[in-house]
Amino acid sequence: GAVVSQHPSWVICKSGTSVKIECRSLDFQATTMFWYRQFPKQSLMLMATSNEGSKATYEQGVEKDKFLINHASLTLSTLTVTSAHPEDSSFYICSAGGGMAVQYFGAGTRLSVL
Amino acid sequence: QKEVEQNSGPLSVPEGAIASLNCTYSDRGSQSFFWYRQYSGKSPELIMSIYSNGDKEDGRFTAQLNKASQYVSLLIRDSQPSDSATYLCAVSGAGGTSYGKLTFGQGTILTVHP
């Protein structure tokens, strides 16, 4: 399968700071990337769909001003959690869309906000 | 609301047995169906994709799809302790803005005991 790189894998930050997470498709060009959040013992919840060169589409209930998504190239999408608070602590996972609706996932970023 | 439901777990099987995982979905127009495996603390890994009615086999894994019944299943033959993980059923929307977006089931925890 395709390789999707996600960094950092783990970040700890103070409340009120911003955190940027990068997602790169290493061996194919991904027109569409997706960002998910997963809380312990729960399934993946889609936060937003990121399309190269256009604004991201956010799912209902996700604050677009808090979770800034940029998809500047066909291989890179970034998620910035602005003014993070403890309730934002979660496992954030990106994926890159391949053909036939397949999604290939990055390794995930575990965010802990103190 | 589009939903994906998986059989309640956890599921425990002895090593060498067949593990059967089931999933139903509510959107009759869904076109693409996936099974992902997620180890604890890791991101999902694609195991199988299936797009048409019937069976699809890949090694010890067999996916079965019945669109009329809106049902998809995964069979794992000769289960191994390394198969112990959470299995996620994912369904892609029918088209338009839903195409390529995955809706995940809540996951079934599988434990294979020696």
Image (cartoon, rainbow, N blue to C red):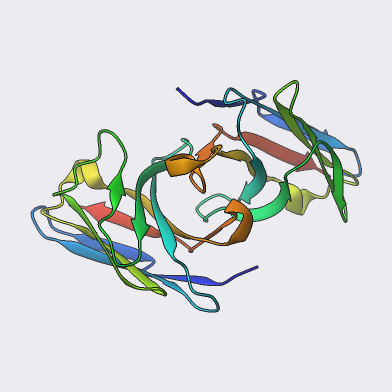
Q: Position of residue A8 (x, y in %)?
A: 34, 70
Q: Nearer the viewer, residue A45 or B56?
A: B56
Residue at (13, 49) in percent of width and height? A65
Residue A26 visible in the current orientation:
yes
User: Within the image, what quadrant is residue B27 found in?
Assistant: top right
In the image, residue A27 above or below residue A90: below
Q: Position of residue B53 (x, y in %)?
A: 81, 36
Q: Nearer the viewer, residue B15 or A62?
A: A62
User: In the image as oriented, which residue stretches furthest toward the front?
Assistant: B96
User: Within the image, what quadrant is residue B21 found in?
Assistant: top right
Residue at (40, 73) in percent of width and height? A74
Q: Position of residue B28 (x, y in %)?
A: 62, 25
Q: Position of residue B4 (x, y in %)?
A: 57, 28
Q: Nearer the viewer, residue A84 or B70?
A: B70
In the image, residue B49 above or below residue A30: above
User: In the image as oriented, which residue stretches furthest toward the bottom?
Assistant: A27
Residue A44 visible in the current orientation:
no
Image quarter where the N terminus of chain B lies is top left
Please give left or right for residue A4 compared with residue A85 in the image: right
Image quarter where the C terminus of chain B lies is top right
Residue at (27, 54) in percent of width and height? A112
Residue at (59, 35) in percent of width and height? B107
Q: Nearer the viewer, residue A88 or A52?
A: A52
User: Within the image, what quadrant is residue B18 found in?
Assistant: top right
Please give left or right for residue A111 compared with residue B112 in the image: left
